[in-house]
Each structure stands twice: as C-alpha cells, then as structure tokens.
Amino acid sequence: MTARRGSILLIDDEEKILKALGRALRDAGHEVIECSNPRSGQKLLAERPIDLVIVDNVMPQLSGLELIREYVGSTPEGERAQILMMTAHATVESALEAMKLGALDYLQKPFEIDELLVVVRRALDHQRLRTEYGYLRSERDERFDNYGIVGSSRAIQEIIARAERVAETKSTVLITGETGTGKELIARAIHNRSAQRDMPLIRVNCAAIPEALLESELFGHVRGAFTGAATSKKGKFALADGGTIFLDEIGTMSPALQSKLLRVLQEREFEPLGAERTERVDLRVIAATNRDVRQMVAEGRFQEDLFYRLNVIPIVLPPLRERREDIPALVDHFVRKHAQRTGRRVERVDEGARAALRQYDWPGNVRELENTIERAVVLSSGPVLTPRDVSVIGAVAQQSSGLPSLKLRPNIEWVEKETIRRALDASRGIKKEAAELMGISQRALSYYLAKYRIE
Ligand SMILES: Nc1ncnc2c1ncn2[C@@H]1O[C@H](COP(=O)(O)OP(=O)(O)OP(=O)(O)O)[C@@H](O)[C@H]1O
Ligand SMILES: [Mg+2]
C-alpha cells in the first residue's frame, strides 16, 4: 500500500522562493502546485482537492491573512485544507491572527527546509485525521438515515451500537418493548446492516394469523395436507432461507407451535404440513413482543427452552416516557417527514407545543408521537405548530379525564370539530368558503355545525 502524500498548494508572489520551496517539497515526495498570484490561488483552492495550503503573508494583490479569512469564511471546516502561513519577523502578529482564524501553524522567514518538511508532515497528518473523521461521521449519518432510527438518549445509542454488532453475526435476537417503541424498526435495521441484506427479510405477525393457519404459514404445506389445501405452499421459513425471519408478536404463539418453533431453532429443520420430507434452512431469527415473556415463562404460558433459544441477544426498547430527551429530535424528524410528504409548509414547533410534547406520557410511544405530529401537520393553519395543533388526541383527552383515551369515535369527532373550527377561522366565518376549504358541500357543513353545536 502506498501512503498518500497529500497535495500542497504553495502561494507566494516571489517566484524564486516559490520555485525553491516547490522543489524541496517535491523532492520529499509531495505533490505541489505553485502559484504566484493569490487570486488564482484562491480559485485553485475552491476548485481542486487540496490538503494543505502554504501561503505567504505579504503579497501586493491580496495579503495571506485576507486570503485565509475569505477561504475560512466560505468553506465549511470539514471541507477545508490545512493552512500554514509564511511570515517575516515584522508580521508575526498577522500569523497569530491567521491561527486564530484556523491556520494550523506558521513559519517564520527565513526558515530551513527541514523545518518546513516537519511542519508540512504534521499538517498533512492532521488533514488525514480530519478526512477520516469526516468520512466516518458521514458514513454514520448515512447509516442513521438508512435505519431512520432517531434518538440521542443513551438507551437508543446503546441499542444502535448493539444492533450494529449483532448484525455482523447470525445470532438470534429477541426485541422487547411496549407497543410503538420501534421494535420492527430495529429488526429491519439489523437485517439491512447484515451480510444477508440482499436476501429476504420475511415478517410473520403471529398475532394476526389465526392459530389454525399459523403452522402452515410458517412451515408450508403440501397439497391435500388439510381440507382446503388445494395446492402446496411454501412456508415463511422456506421463503426466508438465506435471510432473516422476523417473528413479530411472538408472545401470542400457542404452546403447540412453540414446541415446533423450538425444534426449528435447535435443528434448523422442519416438515411442511403433510410432507414426508424434512426441509433445512439457514437463516437468522429475530423475534419481537410487547409482552413480558419472562413473566409468561414464570406463569407456564411460554416455554422456557424456547425463551432461552430466542433470548440469545436481548434488545430492550424502553418506553418513550423513560427517554424523554429523544422527544425533541423525534418531533423535528416527524415534522420534516410529514411536511415533505404532504407538501405542507410547516417549519417548526413553538416552545409551548414542545413543552407539551415533552411532558406527555405517550402510552403509544413513538408511534403515537408520530401520529400526533402527522395530524398536527395536516391540520395546521400556519408554518408554526402551537400547543393547540399538537393536542389532538392524548393530551386533550388526558386533560379532561386524567387518562389518555384511545376510543376511536370521540377522537374522530374531536378531529372533525377541530377541522371545522379551523376552516371557519380561515374563512373568517364565511360558511361557503369554509365548506370549499374542507371539500364538502354547504349542506354537509350545516349538518356538522348542528351536530357539534358550533355557532
Ligand atoms: N427511534 C425512532 N426513530 C424514528 N422513528 C421511530 C423510532 N422508533 C419508532 N419509530 C417509528 O414509530 C413507528 C412504530 O415503530 P415500530 O412499528 O417499529 O414499533 P413496534 O415496537 O414494532 O410497535 P408494535 O409493538 O405496536 O408492533 C414506526 O413508524 C417507526 O418508524
Ligand atoms: Mg411491531
């Protein structure tokens, strides 16, 4: 492997010095561009990838200090070259000034070539570290974007780190946490980060499939295996072969199926319903549940062996109310997401609304927060969300009864009422306009006004 020597831009109006320094640096293996005009030097800096710029201070067209000031002002730190200034004794002041602006060091003229080489090597080392750091950081940002996992709390950061580590293995993972805490999001992140990411990720919602069908869903069946099995069908385990099977809501699985699942986990083989043959699979299992499986084991409702087989790598997602510091970032994330999705110009959330969002207990966790923000964005009348905008479900119900209500009807009615009130606000009480804004007829509006006794 050849070490990268770095590219150096040398700017000095005195041709003789320029040539001499250029030669010395080139002899030391560096790539050098010489430039006797600071204005053209500036252009080069903007156009080419340069690792280090060495600039003389006193030049007639533009002083080195000015050049540095303009460069630093127009280029973000992560994209900047390292800066060294050359200066005569009389202008050491401006060299110090240059360092305040961000130059790494200065060379006082006259200097020895060896001194130059040492300073240059150090500057290039700095630049390499900066580039690597910037690269790692952007790679990390990109990964966060991919996963869509937002949150700076220690809990979330540790979960991301654990997910990244486990992604490199094929170990079985059990993700637990209340509803809406992000279990599926983490499961997908693990798969997408794994070496099997191009293979399928198959999700089975164990709670949504009737008990009688679940076994054939998981393991498949042959034709005539049971009444109604007119053709043979591949099961999810076979479909996920080579990739990941995500067993969601595992806590709802019947004891009989639990035993069958245990066998697959132990032996990596199973028989489709009605089949004589055994199928082998090579896949990763991720299971998730919002139930307390340990408790279920204690109560004899979940097989202990299966629990230990699943719980190889446990990931526990804490409820949102136990990591409130994640709320502001999540709020901003969801505002951006839904503003973009709906094309609405919602730019920020005011202080009052932020405080309300942070205080609320979020029994539905991140999902409930997202739904609240989505509704607020859709219903908002301006670019700034206020406490009224975000009080759509939980908070309002909570104020009146002390408990959040998840009853559908009252919440829908509340949204209807709120929408009509806002439409009337927006149309300064003119019913015809309000009806148009809402896309309903005036008759429908009259009906709602009577229903909700709105004046
Ligand atoms: N940390 C997070 N950053 C961004 N979005 C999140 C985060 N956590 C959850 N979400 C979002 O919240 C919603 C609910 O998450 P998810 O479906 O993963 O929850 P869950 O734990 O599987 O819930 P349930 O138990 O109800 O199935 C999803 O839209 C998800 O993208
Ligand atoms: Mg889920």
Image (cartoon, rainbow, N blue to C red):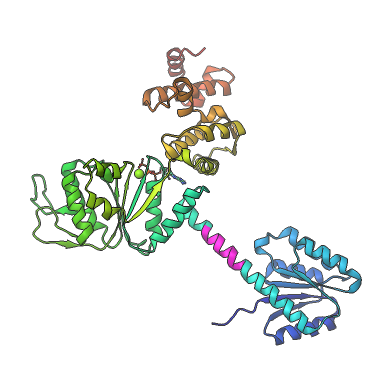
In the image, residue 133 lies in the stretch drawn in magenta: yes
Quadrant housing residue 385? top right
Which residue is located at x 7 percent, y 50 percent? 224
Q: Is residue 416 above or below residue 29?
A: above
**Outermost residue to the front:** 298
Q: Nearer the viewer, residue 312 or 183?
A: 312
Instruction: Give the side of residue 125 with respect to residue 237, left or right.
Output: right
Q: Please, which residue is most extreme toward the bottom here?
A: 27
Measuring 57% from the left and 21% from the top, which residue is drawn there? 425
Please report the residue visible at 21 percent of the width from the left and 48 percent of the height from the top. 303
Compare residues 378 and 396 and report the one nearer the observer.
396
Ligand 1 is found in which quarter of the picture?
top left
Q: Give the vertical position of 418 relative to 12 (above or below).
A: above
Residue 219 at x, y = what percent?
18, 53
The percent coordinates of residue 394 (x first, y second) are: 45, 28
In percent of width and height, residue 331 lies at 53, 40
Q: Main secondary structure of the magenta part?
A: helix
Residue 191 image point, x, y percent = 37, 57
Q: Which residues are magenta?
A: 131-140
